[in-house]
Image (cartoon, rainbow, N blue to C red):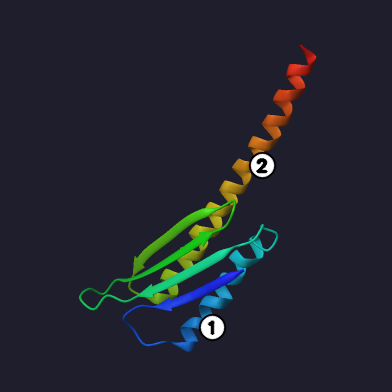
């Protein structure tokens, strides 16, 4: 699994990076059985004009290609939101793939009965 945390137009913060790694563990756990390569790309981008900072998380793997981004005033709250949204989207997509597999198998069984 390839993980990259980028700080655009801001100083590197080891405290923020540690917190991000802690929060990304949930997504990493979800993707641990995924075929390789798996890329996680987290980008912190502060706004120097407005009070809203932007965080973007990209997940790229053979099965998933998702982007989650959010803007907010607090980096920690915004990061929590981005991670939660990404985790929920990955769960929904996995459920959708599993349902498609089940239906494909059932469809073949019904064809044989005819």
Residue where numbered disc 2 is placed: 98
Instruction: Classify residue 10 by image quadrant.
Output: bottom left
* Picture quarter with the N terminus: bottom right
Work out whether 75 lies above or below 101. below
Counting other residues with Cα less than 10 Å from the Cα at mark 2, is it few (<14), some (14-19), or many (20 or more)? few
Side (left or right) of 2 relative to 14: right
Badge 1 marks a residue whose secondary structure is helix
Residue drawn at point x = 44 percent, y = 59 percent: 68
C-alpha separation, residue under disc 2 versus residue under disc 1: 34 Å
User: Pointer 1: what residue?
Assistant: 18
Which residue is farthest top?
114
Q: Nearer the viewer, residue 67 or 19?
A: 67
Q: Which residue is drawn at 48% across and 55% down?
A: 66
- Residue 9 percent location from the top left of the image: 31, 81
| Marker disc for residue 6 | none
- For the point 59% across and 53% down, the residue is 62
Coordinates of residue 21 in the picture (x, y in percent):
56, 77
Q: Is residue 109 above or below residue 17?
A: above
Q: Is mark 2 on a helix, strand or loop?
A: helix
x and y, in percent, of residue 19 in the image: 52, 80
Indicate the position of residue 33 as horizontal and vertical percent values.
70, 59
Name the image quarter holding the C terminus.
top right
Which of the two residues, 38 or 53, is positioned nearer the viewer here? Answer: 38
Rendered position, 67 above or below 78: above
Question: Quick one: 73 or 82, which is closer to the camera?
Answer: 82
Q: Which of marks 2 and 1 is nearer the N terminus?
A: 1
Asked whether disc 2 touches disc 1, contact meaning CB atoms under 8 Å apart, the reply is no
Name the residue located 61 percent from the left edge and 71 percent from the top edge: 25
Find the residue positioned furthest to the front: 37
Q: Would residue 26 appear left or right of 77 to someone viewing this image?
A: right
Report crowding for label 1: few under 14, some 14 to 19, many 20 or more residues within 10 A (C-alpha).
few
The image quarter containing residue 13 is bottom left
């Amino acid at each position: 699994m390839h993980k990259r945390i980028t700080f655009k137009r801001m100083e590197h913060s080891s405290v923020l990076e540690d917190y991000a790694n802690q929060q990304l563990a949930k997504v990493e756990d979800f993707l641990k059985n995924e075929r390789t390569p798996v890329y996680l790309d987290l980008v912190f981008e502060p706004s120097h004009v407005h009070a809203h900072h932007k965080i973007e998380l990209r997940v790229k793997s053979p099965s998933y290609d998702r982007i989650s981004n959010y803007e907010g005033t607090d980096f920690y709250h915004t990061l929590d939101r981005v991670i939660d949204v990404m985790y929920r989207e990955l769960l929904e997509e996995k459920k959708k793939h599993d349902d498609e597999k089940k239906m494909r198998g059932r469809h073949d069984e019904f064809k044989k009965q005819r």
